[in-house]
Amino acid sequence: MQNDLKKFLQMLKTATELIEEKYFRLPVAGDDSVYRERVYCYELYNQLRCIWGNFNNFRLCGEVDKSNHKWFKEKPYSRAKPDLLVHKPGSMDNKANLAVIEVKKYDKRVSFKHDLKKLTWFCKDAKYFPGIFLVYGEAEGDVIKRKLLRSLQSSDQNDIQRQLIQVFHHAHVRDACMEIPW
């Protein structure tokens, strides 16, 4: 699994590097361009699919609805739809669920806590590893790191487990995302 994860993370870096300005910040008629998470996610999905090939039978899926899945029924995140999943559909063994990914545009007013709690749950209870939290938008890495640590401090110790989550920041168009150790 470590080799598969390493390969996927390299694909993620390559895919973020290929995202153009019009998907990073959406042009708006008569106004400044804006960050739109869905637009960014769809283009990230597109770029990943373009370089995917035959990746050890893993599939990339976007926003999979787990609400009627017997494994998820009546659990805390049964209605959650992660932005992206890297998995082998139809299996719940430890080697089938490579990564669960949440994407968040950087906004100094928005907390990361909910997304980090969701990623922790998917890693602990749904057997994904790791959780990948990808923040995009112009901000310094240390600003992102401080927001992450504030989310940890304002949470129950078991709600967010940072050893289960890898954080990446895609700061600028045509740059690859970079891991933020936290």
Image: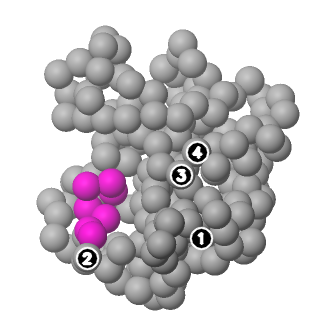
Q: Is residue 106 above or below residue 160?
A: below
Question: Contact, CB < 8 Å: mark 3 with mark 1?
Answer: no
Question: Contact, CB < 8 Å: mark 3 with mark 4?
Answer: yes
Among the 4 quarters of the image, the one containing residue 26: bottom right
Of residues 153 and 81, the one drawn nearer to the viewer in this rendering: 81
Q: Is residue 127 above or below residue 156?
A: above
Q: Amino acid at mark 3?
A: Val
Q: Is residue 136 magenta?
A: no
Q: Amino acid at mark 1?
A: His
- In this rendering, would 66 be left or right of 37? left
Q: Nearer the viewer, mark 3 or mark 1?
A: 3
Q: Which residue is mark 2?
A: 109
Expressed as whole percent of the image width and height from the top left, the position of residue 27 reads: 55, 66
Q: Is residue 115 magenta?
A: yes
Q: Which mark is residue 170?
A: 1
Q: Which residue is mark 4?
A: 42
Q: Amino acid at mark 2?
A: Arg
**Between disc 2 and disc 4, whose residue precedes?**
4
Of residues 86 and 65, the one drawn nearer to the viewer in this rendering: 65
**CA distance for labels 2 and 4:** 24 Å
**CA distance for labels 2 and 3:** 20 Å
Among the 4 quarters of the image, the one containing residue 106: bottom left
Expressed as whole percent of the image width and height from the top left, the position of residue 44 reads: 64, 50
Which stretch did the figure color magenta?
A: 110-116
What residue is rendered at 70% in x and 61% in y? 19
- Looking at the image, the residue that sits furthest to the front is 30
